[in-house]
Amino acid sequence: MKNKLTDLNDHLFTQLERLSDEDLSAEQLAIEIDRAKAVAGVADRVIHNAALVLKAKQAYDSGELTSAHPMLEAK
């Protein structure tokens, strides 16, 4: 499975749509709020990781790093 940041964006908007569903009962809304918190937590870590990879790539490209981790190599 190859996930991309665009997929994350889709998941976040899907969750937002679920939270906006006016037909949810109070119990269903509470479940969606908990789910949204979990999704947001994971999304935060994914975004943090992507920012770290970008920072490392920029450091490698500028010569600050002399070797690249395989994660930074283009596929």
Image (cartoon, grey):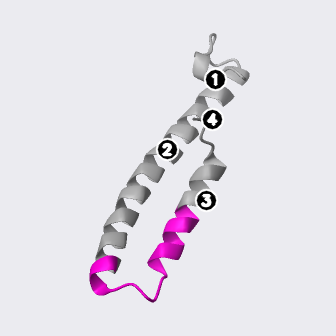
Tell me the distance, in whole angstroms, between the alpha carbons under discs 1 and 4.
Answer: 8 Å
- The amino acid type found where label 2 is placed reads Val
Tell me the distance, in whole angstroms, between the alpha carbons under discs 1 and 3.
Answer: 24 Å
Q: Earlier in the sequence, mark 1 or mark 4?
A: 4
Q: For numbered disc 1, what is the local secondary structure?
A: helix
Q: Which residue is mark 1?
A: 72
Q: Is residue 71 left or right of residue 15?
A: right
Provide the residue span drawn in magenta: 12-28
Tell me the distance, in whole angstroms, between the alpha carbons under discs 2 and 3.
Answer: 14 Å
Q: Which mark is residue 54?
A: 4
Report if the CB atoms under discs 1 and 3 are less than 8 Å apart: no
Q: Earlier in the sequence, mark 1 or mark 3?
A: 3
Q: Which mark is residue 46?
A: 2
- The amino acid type found where label 4 is placed reads Leu
Q: Nearer the viewer, mark 1 or mark 3?
A: 3
Residue at x 54%, y 35% (from the top left corner): 52
Which residue is at the far bottom? 22
Q: For numbered disc 2, what is the local secondary structure?
A: helix
- The amino acid type found where label 1 is placed reads Leu
Q: Position of residue 44 (x, y in %)?
A: 45, 51
Q: Position of residue 40 (x, y in %)?
A: 43, 58
Tell me the distance, in whole angstroms, between the alpha carbons under discs 2 and 1.
Answer: 16 Å
Q: Is residue 1 left or right of residue 21?
A: right
Q: Which residue is mark 3?
A: 10
Camera-nearest residue between 64 and 26: 26
Callout 2: few (<14), some (14-19), or many (20+) C-alpha neighbours within 10 Å?
some
Q: Nearer the viewer, mark 2 or mark 3?
A: 3
Residue at x 29%, y 85% (from the top left corner): 26
Q: For numbered disc 3, what is the local secondary structure?
A: helix
Q: Quadrant of the N terminus?
A: top right
Callout 3: few (<14), some (14-19), or many (20+) C-alpha neighbours within 10 Å?
few
